[in-house]
Image (tube, rainbow, N blue to C red):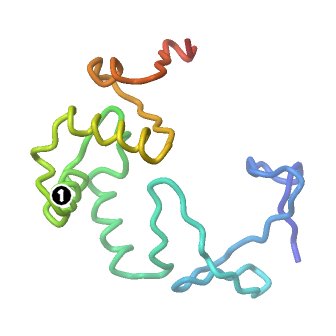
Amino acid sequence: MSTYHYPEGHLFYRKLHRNYPKIVRGEGCYLYDEDGKTYLDAVGGAYVANIGHGVAAIGEAMARQAGQVAYVNGMAFTNEPAERMAAELAARSPGDLDKVSADEIMKLLDRLNTEFKKTIIMVTHDPRAAERAHLVRHLDKGELS
């Protein structure tokens, strides 16, 4: 078995003192390393949905999209697939999401905070929302004040 770890390779490994198996293929919810060992892939992350490996329809859809635009940062841009997905989620969700105001959202956040003792962290550019916060921090050029 080959080992993949720091400092043997040029890859930036997330944990420097760990040996990593090299995955050579995936099928459905399973991954296979170069020695044939099978792993259940139950890992997810931000903007990641684990729908399985080797799903031809997903690969084809990804290739079509990458032929137009592969990725855009949501802090600076939008794109048609993201807009369509948001509209579909809103249409399938209960209530009228087009009519929710900033005041209604703030009331909900206040209720979560007071009734359920939940800490709410919100990043906003809306000064009206910031006025109602119990604690406000400002981020300016990477410095939190």
The image quadrant that residue 60 belongs to is bottom left
Residue at coordinates 46% horizontally, 48% vertically from top-left?
Answer: 116
Left or right? Give the position of 73 relative to 102. right
Image height check: is 80 above or below 76?
below
- List the residue tagged with mark 1: 90
Disc tally is 1
Q: Position of residue 83 (x, y in %)?
A: 19, 51
Residue at coordinates 55% horizontally, 85% vertically from top-left?
Answer: 27
Q: Quadrant of the N terminus?
A: bottom right
Residue sitting farthest toward the front? 115
Residue at coordinates 40% horizontally, 44% vertically from top-left?
Answer: 112
65 and 104: which one is in front?
Answer: 104
Left or right? Give the position of 27 relative to 81. right
Image height check: is 99 above or below 96?
above
Left or right? Give the position of 98 relative to 35. left
The image quadrant that residue 105 belongs to is top left
Q: Position of residue 61 (x, y in %)?
A: 30, 70
94 and 28: which one is in front?
Answer: 94
Q: Quadrant of the C terminus?
A: top right
Disc 1 residue crowd, few under 14, some 14–19, many 20+, Cα 10 Å:
some
6 and 115: which one is in front?
Answer: 115
Q: Considering the numbered disc 1 on the image, is that residue within a helix, a strand or a loop?
A: helix
Q: Position of residue 12 (x, y in %)?
A: 74, 47
Q: Position of residue 135 (x, y in %)?
A: 48, 21
> Given the image, on which type of amino acid does mark 1 rest?
Ala
43 and 89: which one is in front?
Answer: 89
